[in-house]
Structure formats: structure tokens, C-alpha cells
Image: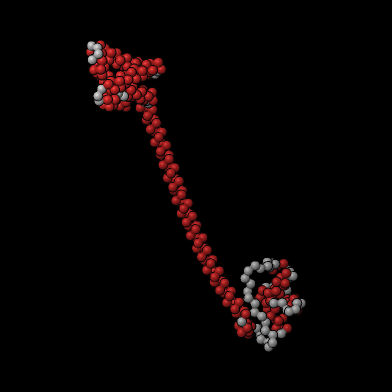
Amino acid sequence: MSKRVATAAPAVAMTVVSMVLTLAVMVMWLGGSMPWQIALVVGLGLDGGWLATLAYERRLAAQGDHSTAVTTVGWAFGLAATGVLVAHALTEDATGAWLAVSWLPLGAKALWLVHGMWERTALTPVALDAIRGIQQEARDEAAVARARLRAQAGTEETRLTAVTEAGSRVARVQAKTAERLSGAWSTLEAARQGEGTARALTCVTDRVTPGAQPRWELPVWGPYEPVPALDAAPALSEGELDRIVTELHTGETPPLSYRELSLRFRAAGHSASETRLRAAWRRITATAS
């Protein structure tokens, strides 16, 4: 009800002011050329027609109906009242002041139009409560969805940060390991290339024969050939192992190194432990020397 009064009260007030102003203008303007009683009747007739059409429009609106003809007549009376006020303003010395109030009839008509639109779209308290409940539910769901998305984003950010840090640590460890292996390999290569170092290492690992210095080989680091299973063939005796190693060692010129001999030994399908094979190679090379 308060909203109904909020839209109807301004329309009623402007209607009363417009009617009083129109009646006063008619009496003042026409009173000089005709009896004021006649001017009063003319003013009341104009206001009466305006008010009668407004009352009929309100009755139709209360019944949920509408008449275009009545609405047209009502706006015609409003335009006539405004025309009277404008014509009076143009004949007075204070034209601007009278023109400033000449819009009141049309303004009152517009306010009644707004009030009618409010009535056609007004809802009951039950419907308004239902709408408010739906809107609140939608806001709650949106807030929960936003919170869920923020939580998921935070969790994903934390996971990505942990994975990135772990990957960075692994990369640093791999880099340090590769650097150390490279340094160790360089040291071994330098030792291998040094004649004095090779001679010293040979002296502490095998008998030295003047004029025949076995070459010290670096350990294998990199791709290697798969070694056949040890049980693929019966274990070789010391004599058979020495014979095979001798054939492989003397079958090439210059003689094969231990690494090449080991690869050909395995490729031929023979099996022997690395310790026995290296011992046989040392015996053969020592004998050849």
C-alpha cells in the first residue's frame, strides 16, 4: 500500500494544482472581456472534462480494462489546458514565469500514466517474497560457485608450485651430477693419455715386460651391448677360455684391446664372468709380451 500511495500522491497533488491554476488563469484572462462568472464556468468545464476522463480511466484500470478513446480524450483535455496556459503566458508581461507552469496539466497526466503502469505491474507480497527468495538462492549459489572456483584455483596453483620446485631441484641435482661426472671423466681421460700414469697403473696391476706396455682402458660410460644370459651356454674351463681369448686376440692386427675383445667374445655367444675374462686376457697378453 505504501508503494501505491508513493505513486498516486504526486499525481493527485499535481492534478489539483493544475486544475486550480487553469481555473485561475481562465478567470483572470477572460474576466476582462466577459463576466467573470462566464469565465469561471469555462474554466470549470475545462477542468471538469479533464477530471471526468481521468476518473473513467481509473475505473477502467481498476477493472483491468483500457479504452484508447477515453485516453485520447483525456490527453486532448490536458493539451487544451496547457494551450490555455501558454496563450495566457504570451499575453502577459512575465511570459517566462507563466510558461514555467504551463506544463503542469501534461505533467499531471504523465504522473497518472506512471501510476497506471505501476498498478498493471504490481505484485502481491507473496509473489514478492517468492521472487526475493529465488534471487537470494541464486546469489547463494553464485557465491558458493565462486568460492569453489577460488579454492580449486588455489589448490592448482599450490600443486603447480610444488611440481615446479621439485622439477627445479631435480634439474639442479642432475646438472651437478653431470658436472661431477664430466670432471671425473676428464680426470680419467687425462690419466689415460699420460704415459707415466699408464705405466704406473700397469706396474701395480700386472707384470711389466720391457718393450711391451699394455694399454690401460677407461671404463665404459654410455650405450652398451646387452650381455647374453650366463646360463645360455655351459661355463668354459680355463683352458677353453684361454684358447678363445688367444684366437680373438691374435686374430686381428694390431691385437684387440680388452674392450673390443670382450664385445666380440660376448657376440660369439660365449659366456664367462668379467673377472675370469679379464684374467684370461691378462694371461694371454702377458704371454704374448
x then y, percent, for residue 37: 23, 11
Q: Residue at x 76, y 77 (%)?
A: 251
- Is 198 on the left-hand or right-hand side of 157? right
Would you say residue 219 is visible in this rendering? Answer: yes
x then y, percent, for residue 217: 65, 77
Pick the front one: 69 or 186: 69
Give residue 79's quadrant in the image: top left
Give residue 281's quadrant in the image: bottom right
Q: How is the image coloured?
A: secondary structure
**In this view, 241 is above or below 5:** below
Task: Pick the quarter of the image with the N terminus.
Answer: top left
Task: Pick the quarter of the image with the C terminus.
Answer: bottom right
Q: Residue at x 23, y 15 (%)?
A: 32
Count the marks: 0
Give residue 283's quadrant in the image: bottom right
x then y, percent, for residue 286: 70, 83
Pick the front one: 268 or 45: 45
x then y, percent, for residue 263: 70, 71
Q: Residue at x 65, y 83 (%)?
A: 206
What residue occupies the far bottom of the structure in this picture?
Answer: 210
Q: Residue at x 57, y 72 (%)?
A: 182
Pick the front one: 1 or 47: 47
Would you say residue 23 is visible in this rendering? Answer: no
